[in-house]
Amino acid sequence: MEQSWRQAKSMFAAMLSVPLFWLVVFFMVPLGIVWLYSFGENRGLVDIAFTGTWSNYARALEWDNLAIFLKSIGIAAITTALCLVIGFPVALAITFAPEKVKPWLLLLIMLPFWTNLLIRTYALIAVLREQGYINMGYHWGFDIVNGLTGGALGEFHALPLMYNNFAVVFGLVFVNLPFMILPLYSTLDRLDRSLLEASLDLGAGHIRTLFNVVVPMAGAGIASGILITFIPALGSYLTPDLLGGADALMIANVIEAQFKRANNWPFGAALSFLLVYMTFIAIAVQGLIERKPAGSRS
Amino acid sequence: MSANGFNKSRRSLLAATGAAAIGISFGGLSACSQGKKAAAGAEEPKLNFYNWDTYIAENTLGDFEKASGIKVSMTNFATNDELFAKMKTGKTGYDVIVPSNDFVTQLAQANLLLPLDKAKLPNFKNIDPGVMSPDYDPDRKYSVPYTWLTLGLGYRKSKMPKGFVPDSWKYVFDSDMFKGRIALLSESGDLVRLGAKYLGYSVNAVTPEVVAQVEAMLKKQKPNIKAFHSDNGQDMLIAGDVDLVIEYNGDMMQAIADDKDKDLAYIVPKEGTQLNADCLCIPVDAPRPDNAHKFLNYIMEPQVGAQIAEFIGYATPNLAAKALTSPEYQNNPNIFPPADVMAKCEYAAFQGAEKAQLYDAAMTRVKA
Amino acid sequence: MTASVKKTPPAPLEYFRRWPLRAWMVVVTVFLYGPLLSLMVFSFNDSKANVVWRGFTLKYYEKAFNNSSLIEAFGNSLTIAFFSTLISVVVGAMAAIVLWRFRFAGKSLFNAGLAIPIVVPEICMGVGMLVFFAKVMPWPQDLPWPLNLGAIIIAHVSFSFPFVAVVVRARLASFNREQEEAAKDLGASDFRALMDVVVPHVQPSLIAGALLAFTLSLDDFVITFFTAGPDTVTFPVKVYSMVRFSVTPEVNAASTILIVVTVLLTFLALKFQGSSALTAGHDGGAAEKK
């Protein structure tokens, strides 16, 4: 598949230079500063000395913080799984929609996300809260049933939809869904349809075709969808902050507090980079798993 | 935080004044340019003002431009922490900022504030002599007092038992009376200090042992807490998600003013509370310090201060300005608590970054 | 999914015509739009508190339109999103093509480097940008608009273009290299073959990537907050400082305007570019498959 860079030097140089330059100068350098902070110590209120200490990491790995890490991973994983389950049929439907409709369907998925995240989250509060639309509808239905049956259901209790972990997951799915749908669509759209037809012709049902043909072939898209959803979900802090209850603390909330309230940038940097290292390990593992079947196929 | 409806008519009057001011500045261009000439000096007639949202009267900036020729461009921040994080690296381009008392100390200790040139601020004479040398800024070296505020409990009257008033921090910190119906402030420093206050300590005597005590108390209380809110407790109260919240008096005042059912109320608990003061300061590397001084002095004009105070509904430390305000404002116990309550209130001092980290670590464990 | 076949059955692969998928699309649409519609409706609510309906009013639109700093923030946001998207798509596509096409020393390193912007917590990157633009490469304060937005645009491209690269690469994985070879056999230069054969193939992913980059830029608060100066406030930063205290219908009104403006702009762009351009890309893809 690939070509050695020596075979087309000028094009290679032209194509690589810009992204590489951007990545190094406008990303690696700013981030490198923060990375150095993670080995630093506070000197007074403003200055940070690079002492090469590991104490920030040691503190980040204490059980209190690890527990929050694990909880955040759990919430992000549930969110990603839900996004996949909800998003896959949508991507499938868009893929097989008439060509003229496709761009509009894509737009339909993306449009809500041009509203500010904060506004969207506040909009969700109005839906989920105790006197929100869902509970209002529930109350209305409840009263009707009660009226018909003479109070068989007893006293009305609002559904606890807000200020708990359910609300956090709901909010994260609401916010991250298009990050799943777009890459899924991008891969599904290039599937060789003749293979699907062959599968159906040979008597496999739609469900079997889906799981035995479509899903394996869309592996790369699913993987990038999972990655691109999981990571922002893991790093979210506004959603748990606004929708969560008394125990809704995710790792990004702790990180944010270090950079602002606690004014402890070195510790915040260490926590952030722990997240970075962990994700790298996850990407590497995922790469290893992916490489094997891909290699055997080609 | 903006309008406090207890004085609607006055507000519309102010708005009309503002509109008239705009009309004048469009109509009388010559007058305007004269003003500019007077103000010019060495600095360009411009000022970058970094303020809390809706924390100034609508006509103030326009009037100031008319009077001095200096055009103010105001942008907003939402918390002191954000302000400090941005100021930390310097070179922000702001000329005037509005930190709270403990952050005045913190910014000053970090050498991020410009010492004020008192000769350029004759209107300091209007300020209450009692706040001219506070602990957080001795001799007002860096700060002009702007407003002061209290933390207290906002509640819904109809959800309380008959005749009951939640007059103690107990009901949010140490009681299951309102199980699942209370929301606490998520700001770790304020919350730990208020917890200490409930336990009988001064907000400035919070040792690591006291922090541990407060932490244990909050962990025990956690099942009764609906949420930790980030300064939007009044919204939760209005929406009926909770019946009792810790909030700032100004936020609650606005909620009470907008509440058509007259069902909301605010109280400073009997144990006393923590006071906060917001101040005007000039960053050490402000591009236009001269304009900044002119602006600070203008804000302390009695008439200007009075307009701002009534518009934003917070307590003013400017005695000359207070004298010009309406009796409704002057006699509002939610703005100016009675003397016996005030006797039990205190300002929280900045006690170093380690203390802030200690508070934050404790609250992280509570919320985990 | 095993949809009972109707009287005039859809063709085997016309999943879009099958009712379970259609129903699902409707459900997802309601899920995505319900909260936003309620937000829009409440922008007409005659009450400061955003909870109970108190009657119809337009006064919050009047307020939003008279709020010059809000309008300015609005313009800044759209400008930044436009430039950031443009640069991100070009840089991201280049990165994807390099990674897909070439074998070179340090490739896995480059690949990993591209993953970092996706992985790093926003706040961490925000602080990095704050220090970078304060100490390493100070961005002049008083540049004329839109040059004063440069620092924010740079920061936005940094976190957007890797997303574009991911999306484009997923699409490239399906590309049949023989086509490019064929083009070159027919005498096309490397560059020509790339522009005429590869780029049309990845066009859907370029559009998807552009949508993603536009969204990320328009939505970003944290990194922008740390990069923004006195004259470069964006819509999210402005709104954030407004809603921290209380959500007033003015904010709803402003958001409604933002939604309407972006919808209009997108529709215009699609019309102007011609949705035929979009479908042409797809047709090309379809033709190639057959």
Image (cartoon, grey):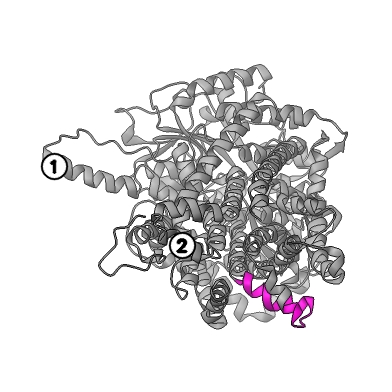
In the image, which residues are magenta?
A: C183-203
Q: Amino acid at mark 2?
A: Ala
Q: Is residue B323 left or right of residue C134?
A: left
Task: Give how far across and how far down residue B294 sits, in percent.
Answer: 74, 59
Q: Which mark is residue A147?
A: 1
Residue under the image location 82 percent in, 71 percent down: A11
Chain of the residue on which disc 1 is drawn: A
Q: Earlier in the sequence, mark 2 or mark 1?
A: 1
Chain of the residue on which disc 2 is drawn: A
Inspect this view and state whether residue B33 appears.
no
Please say if C109 is above or below C279: above
Image quadrant containing the N terminus of chain A: bottom right
Secondary structure of residue under mark 2: helix
Gap in angstroms between the C-alphas marked 2 and 1:
56 Å
Q: Main secondary structure of the magenta part?
A: helix
Q: Nearer the viewer, residue B2 or C130?
A: C130
Count of marks, rendered view:
2
Q: Which residue is mark 2?
A: A198
**Disc 2 packing (10 Å; few <14; some 14–19; many ≥20):** few
Secondary structure of residue under mark 1: helix
Q: Amino acid at mark 1?
A: Gly
Residue under the image location 84 percent in, 63 percent down: A5
Image quadrant containing the C terminus of chain A: bottom right
**Disc 1 packing (10 Å; few <14; some 14–19; many ≥20):** few
